[in-house]
Amino acid sequence: MSFEALALEKEELVVKRGAAIAPYTTFGIGGPADVLAEAYTERALQRVVREAIASRMRWLLIGGGSNLLVGDAGFRGLVIVNRIEHLRVTGNRILAGAGADLGEVVEAAREHSLSGIEFAIDIPGTVGGAIRGNAGAFGRSVGDISVRIRLLEGTELVDRTPAELGFAYRHSRLKENDHVVVEAEFELVPGDRAEMDRVMGQHAAQRARRKEKGLHTAGCFFKNPILADGQKVAAGQLLEAAGAKEIRDGGAGVHAYHANYIVNMGGASADEVLRVAREMKRRVQESAGITLEEEVMVVMDQPAAGVV
Ligand SMILES: Cc1cc2nc3c(=O)[nH]c(=O)nc-3n(C[C@H](O)[C@H](O)[C@H](O)COP(=O)(O)OP(=O)(O)OC[C@H]3O[C@@H](n4cnc5c(N)ncnc54)[C@H](O)[C@@H]3O)c2cc1C
């Protein structure tokens, strides 16, 4: 059976062969996927994953593509784009499909005066991507407000608690397996709308100083390192001190307003981005003796057979 034969309407599943991955990432980089399936419902996602397992095909999940660098040769296997976007507010809880924009969840919370998610304003990407990487800002992260996470584990749908996902700084157990986030439930507290607007405005203004809107970037390329004494250091500061802002290779370079952002300034290849990243890492190693660890997921495959 092929993915096209999964007998689902195009409102549920769209399958493409050889589609470029670049438009699905904020870097705007990434060659063709052997197969690319956009799943709009839980049923479609489940069937696509079942078919991939049955045909022993590897897969790569994409949400908003805002934390992802895919090579120019693309992906040998199945790219699944998660488009399950439902959003429901009940009491203090928000239930969101994994393909829903995290920003939409923040807006729903604001509309219902539900406080606790203000930190997430302007973090790009989907709920699924945010859960996997425990996205956060201003000292808080999505793991702090999650109460139930529905996963596709193999072909089984299972509800998990945050404790089972082992949230830590920009980490969850989902980074160690291929389970798929299908939806997540967040618990917030009744808040004062004016105070929420004030805090969100402050956060948004702080982010605006990075001039990140509309950039072809994946945000911070490296995690903030945690030193032996438990102290967390800002990778951006280490990079700034190491003179990283001057690094450029072809169409890729370090952002003038944030030394931990690599930007596709126009026509950059994935190799150029990686060379910039390597040089950033080398400089921090040399100047501070600290090894930076990638936050962005990097997928570099070989070209399909017959493609030079
Ligand atoms: C300008 C800019 C600013 C940013 N600022 C921040 C910030 O302040 N804080 C922060 O934490 N991050 C930040 N990021 C990074 C990024 O927005 C987050 O990591 C975001 O949560 C990624 O979500 P996504 O849907 O785009 O994930 P993607 O990039 O699509 O995927 C990232 C990883 O998650 C996996 N994945 C995606 N969906 C699912 C799913 N449903 N189930 C299982 N795995 C899945 C993918 O396979 C991939 O490995 C920023 C990025 C940009 C471009």
Image: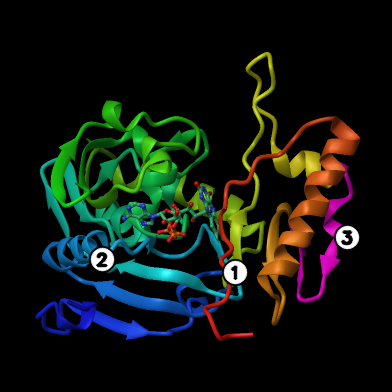
In this orientation, which residue lies closer to the viewer: 181 or 140?
181
Q: Can you tell which mark lies on residue 246?
A: 3
Q: For the point 36% across and 69% down, which residue is it?
A: 78
Q: Which picture quadrant has residue 218? A: bottom right
Which three-letter amino acid code belongs to the residue tagged 1?
Answer: Gly
Q: Using the image, determine if residue 99 lies above or below residue 138.
A: below
Residue ranking furthest to the top: 229
Q: Name the residue that disc number 2 marks.
A: 55
Query: Magenta segment range?
Result: 241-258
Q: Can you tell which mark lies on residue 71?
A: 1
Position of the N terminus, as image quadrant, is bottom left
Q: For the point 27% across and 82% down, which residue is it?
A: 15
Which three-letter amino acid code belongs to the residue tagged 2?
Answer: Ser
Q: Is disc 1 in contact with disc 2, using a CB cutoff of under 8 Å?
A: no
Q: Position of residue 55 (x, y in %)?
A: 26, 66
Q: Which one is earlier in the sequence, the residue at label 1 or at label 2?
A: 2
Asked whether, in this view, residue 199 is left or right of residue 12, the answer is: right
Asked whether, in this view, residue 210 is left or right of residue 23, the answer is: right
Give me the C-alpha separation between circle 2 and circle 3.
47 Å
Q: Can you tell which mark lies on residue 240?
A: none
Q: Is residue 187 visible?
A: yes
> Does ligand 1 reach within 8 Å of label 1's beta carbon?
no
Q: Secondary structure at mark 1?
A: loop
Q: Using the image, determine if residue 188 lies above or below residue 271.
A: above
> Does ligand 1 reach within 8 Å of label 2's beta carbon?
no
Give me the C-alpha separation between circle 1 and circle 3.
24 Å
Q: For the point 41% across and 65% down, which residue is it?
A: 64
Q: Which one is earlier in the sequence, the residue at label 1 or at label 3?
A: 1
Foreground mark, 1 or 3, reads 1
Q: Using the image, determine if residue 268 lies above or below residue 291.
A: below
Foreground mark, 1 or 2, reads 2
Q: Which one is earlier in the sequence, the residue at label 2 or at label 3?
A: 2
